[in-house]
Image (cartoon, helix red, strand yellow):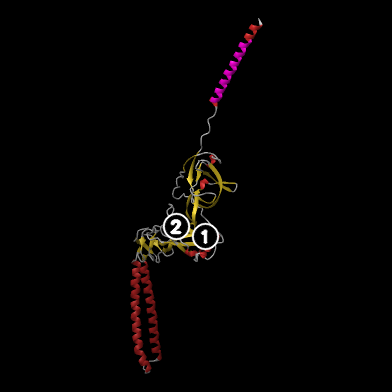
């Protein structure tokens, strides 16, 4: 092969090789572009504005309700129960008839006591008349001293027997009255614990029923020494007494009872086994809504913080003893900053430093963001409130 032909052949092979390399490069580029991951999506977070309002700081305790007076109804005589005259659970008046015991034996005893008294009265009157006749005669020595002494003794004996008969008659009358069992107070009557036909007696182990005065109703709760000192010092600083601190009652359905109460009894000493004072508060109960045995939360407002900033507790992250919030600016960029927190108020947390009113903080999705990141925001939707009886206790404690 001549040199010229040889050069032409080499040139063709070189161009083919170059074209192959270029095609391979294009294919590789297209493949890389095809399999390249898309840019990450912008995180979606839920935000809430820091709310500014006046916040009451309070203390709470679990309280058990009881009657202001609980009158235990028991029989005072032995006999068979023949009648129940009230409806269980209803309001009964003082003096209202509740139960009746068979009165026949007591009526007979009363009649007998009346007859005996009549006999004793007749004898006393006879001896008195006889003594009146003998005394003038004895003064004239018309009768012996023995006759006077006998007449005097007989009269005194008759008088004592009459007094005994009077006492027996009163007892018989009382026992007859005890067959009608009445309420000593106005209040709510409980369920009867005896049935018609039961033999009742004063020594029976259970009461017939209980009548409770529920207006006002008494609420018992325990107060720690620390809580007592906090309340007492706050009251003294305000020129008042701990007993004058107004109290609220939160019922089991979460509603606030419309009537305020006050401390009625503060035990004289601390219970050494629990380290607490036993306290009894009284709350007006005009409609008898509250009943003994119910539970509620007793709340005392200690102070009010003006213009406090509040955010949901879930918006604050605790890390190595510091508290952080993720703030979303007007440009939708995240700024994670430290804050100083105060009291927990229900499901919210008071922020005393590090946050301004109306700033948007992330309440849901904080784990997905970091400082400087751009986010998409949506309004925060709180979780549904827990059912009645399952609510958590607010943390606004001393």
Circle 2 residues within 10 Å: few <14, some 14–19, many ≥20: many
Where 35 sits versus 41, above or below?
above
**Residue stretch rendered in magenta on the structure:** 10-33
Residue 269 percent location from the top left of the image: 54, 65
> Residue 223 — which label?
1
Q: Position of residue 32 (x, y in %)?
A: 56, 25
With 9 as the anchor, is 192 left or right in this view? left
Report the side of 329 relative to 70 (left or right). Answer: right
Q: Secondary structure at mark 2?
A: strand
Q: Position of residue 88 (x, y in %)?
A: 37, 58
Majority secondary structure in the magenta region: helix
Quadrant of the image occupied by residue 134: bottom left
**Is residue 375 or residue 191 the one in the foreground?**
375
The reply to whether residue 45 is in sight is yes
Disc 2: which residue: 249
Name which of mark 1 and mark 2 comes first in the sequence.
1
Local secondary structure at mark 1: strand
Residue 101 appears in the rendering:
no
Depicted 102 relative to depicted 27: above or below: below
Q: Left or right: where does residue 248 sit relative to residue 2?
A: left
Q: Quarter holding the N terminus?
A: top right
Where is 15 relative to 157, above or below? above
């Amino acid at each position: 092969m001549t040199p010229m032909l040889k050069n032409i052949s080499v040139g063709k092979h070189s161009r083919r090789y170059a074209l192959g390399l270029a095609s391979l490069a294009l294919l590789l580029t297209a493949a890389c572009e095809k399999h390249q991951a898309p840019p990450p999506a912008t995180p979606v977070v839920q935000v809430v504005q820091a709310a500014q309002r006046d916040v009451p700081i309070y203390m709470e305790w679990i309280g058990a309700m009881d009657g202001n007076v609980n009158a235990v109804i028991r029989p005072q005589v032995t006999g068979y129960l023949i009648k129940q005259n009230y409806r269980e659970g209803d309001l009964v008046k003082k003096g209202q008839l509740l139960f009746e015991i068979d009165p026949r034996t007591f009526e007979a005893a009363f009649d007998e006591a009346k007859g005996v008294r009549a006999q004793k009265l007749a004898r006393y009157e006879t001896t008195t008349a006889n003594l009146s006749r003998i005394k003038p005669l004895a003064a004239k020595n018309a009768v012996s001293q023995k006759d006077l002494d006998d007449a005097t003794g007989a009269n005194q004996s008759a008088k004592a027997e009459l007094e005994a008969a009077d006492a027996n008659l009163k007892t018989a009358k009382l026992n007859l009255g005890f067959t009608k069992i009445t309420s000593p107070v106005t209040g709510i009557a409980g369920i009867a614990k005896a049935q018609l036909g039961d033999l009742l007696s004063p020594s029976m182990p259970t009461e017939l029923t209980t009548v409770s005065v529920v207006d006002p109703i008494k609420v018992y709760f325990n107060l720690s020494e620390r809580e007592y000192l906090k309340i007492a010092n706050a009251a003294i600083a305000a020129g008042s007494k701990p007993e004058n601190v107004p109290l609220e009652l939160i019922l089991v359905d979460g509603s606030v009872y419309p009537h305020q109460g006050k401390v009625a009894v503060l035990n004289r000493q601390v219970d050494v086994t629990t380290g607490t004072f036993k306290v009894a508060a009284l709350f007006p109960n005009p409609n008898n809504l509250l009943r003994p045995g119910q539970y509620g939360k007793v709340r005392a407002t200690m102070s009010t913080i003006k213009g406090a900033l509040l955010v949901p507790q879930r918006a604050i992250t605790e890390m190595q003893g510091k508290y952080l919030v993720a703030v979303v600016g007007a440009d939708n960029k995240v700024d994670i900053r430290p804050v100083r927190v105060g009291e927990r108020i229900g499901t919210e947390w008071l922020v005393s430093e590090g946050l301004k009113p109306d700033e948007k903080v992330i309440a849901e999705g904080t784990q997905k963001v970091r400082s400087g990141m751009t986010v998409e925001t949506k309004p925060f939707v709180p979780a549904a409130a827990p059912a009645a009886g399952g609510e958590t206790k607010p943390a606004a404690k001393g």
